[in-house]
Amino acid sequence: MAIKLPLRFSILYVLNKAGNQSLTTKEIYEQLSKEYEGEGQFSLDKMENHLMAVKATGIIEAREAYFDEAGEARYKYAITDYGRTRTKYLPPELQN
Amino acid sequence: MAENNANALQLLEAKQLKLAKIGIITGIISGMLWGASGTTLWEALNFEPFTSLWPEAVGSSGAGLEGDAATVHIEYLQMMFGVASGLSLAFMHDFFAALWVLGFNGAKGKFAEYARSLKTTPGKLVCVGAILGGPVGMSGYLLGVTFAGPVYSLPITASYPALAAVLSFFILKERNPLRVWIGVLACICGSLIIAWGDPGVAPNFKLGIALSTLACIGWATEGLFSTYGMDMLDPDVALGIREGFSALVLGLIVLPCIGFYMASKGITADVATSWELVGKTFTMLNSPAVWLCLLGGLFGGFSYIAWYRTLNACGVARGMAFNVTYAFWGVLFGFLMAKIMGREAYITANAWIGAAIICVGAILVSINPKELFKLRDAC
């Protein structure tokens, strides 16, 4: 991703790219770490907060729950139909 | 495996329910902070430079006027001073709120998000919303506070969800349940009750009430634009952009326009312009005014931050319902501030009753009361 987008745009991009597949917080974090590593707002714990906040807007949804390696209960997230309509705000080269 | 996942789901839902309950508290806090913000900003008007610059004579613009003509001219000068003061407060609120929120976002490592967000369409929509919410909404709000006092103007401005419901019906063709229209009617009734109860102590009560409705218009229409953009942006960053852009438009366009208008009427020798008031407020550090404006901006900025936390935790409807309790907090804090400052603290019965009715009305517009504390659907 050459253009650095607002973090939540990038979350939408990653989940749109995943299609119908749901991703864990860690998987989303790892896909974005190259772009945002070193930023104060970007960490695995803070990614969970970002995802919960984006989930509240209806753009993504929590599809499944599981326990991670540390024994913490986590959600897996996927883009919603509403979220797909919002991908029009992504740069054209990132929309599909 | 399936049982494991079911256990994880239970734990997560319990966690979200806990967050939703905390969201109720942050919702009430956001209402309290907004009530405190308006009260604090109003209090700044009781100190220099606002007190010594209050026009009490016809000045050079009214030279030769006597009797009733002189009285009318002085009242005109005082009204214009009120306008200049209210707008200077609106600018200072948004300016300081933008700085506080910038500091908050910087501490959270979100500074870079400002520029990234502004390059996007949702970011630009937030700027459009900022013009409606700031120069229109905040100006109307603080002009209302200036002319009618926070106790009477704050409840009127809390009717903005009702106006938003009406606009959404006509513009977005949204169908609203009966409860919403009852809420709209309650807000109108509450506003009329307050407007009918002139306490006789405000500079220009009826004008203040009318200007408070401008705040409703600004904030209701702001919602139509910025809500559409904000679901894709970090709300703390969107808020910082909103406050900063609003301060920019107020400072570079609105305040100078008022100055030009006053110059065209030949009254700038007798009435300080908004920019003069801002300049004097910033330089008179021994006066409480600048510190009260700084505090008002802090309360206002963090009221919004608390509000967005509530929206995320409990949903938009509950967030709005708890936030509009500021109508009541504004009455209470206005009363307490007067007591603390040793002034007469009489609040009319109309204010209490009207504020309570508006609170109930705004809550009805926002949510079915039965759903208010049913937090499971927020999870």
Image: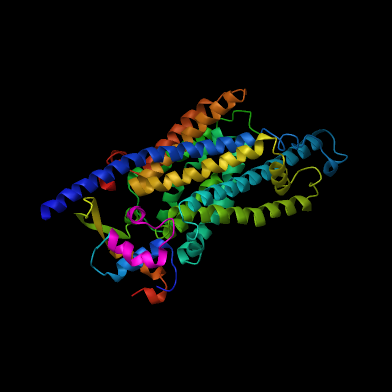
Q: Can residue B45 be seen in this view?
A: no
Residue B63 x %, y %:
87, 41
B353 left or right of B176? right
Residue displayed at 33% across by 62% down = A29
Identity of the residue furthest to the right in this view: B64
Residue A26: in magenta span: yes
Residue B304: in magenta span: no
Image quadrant assignment for residue B46: top right
Residue displayed at 69% across by 42% down = B281
- Image color mode: rainbow
Q: In the image, which residues are magenta?
A: A25-50
Identity of the residue furthest to the bottom in this view: A93
Count of numbered labels shown in the rendering:
0
| Image: B222 above or below A91 | above
- Which is more toward the observer, B329 or B98? B98
| Image: B111 above or below B204 | below
Residue A50 x %, y %:
36, 55
Residue displayed at 47% across by 55% down = B237
Dominant SS type (magenta) = helix
Q: In which quarter of the image is the N terminus of chain B?
A: bottom left
Q: Is residue B51 visible?
A: yes
| Image: A54 above or below B75 | below
Residue displayed at 80% across by 42% down = B270
Residue B159 x %, y %:
47, 42
- Which is more toward the observer, B68 or A31? A31
Residue B194 x %, y %:
52, 33
- Which is more toward the observer, B99 or B134? B99
Image quadrant assignment for residue B131: bottom right
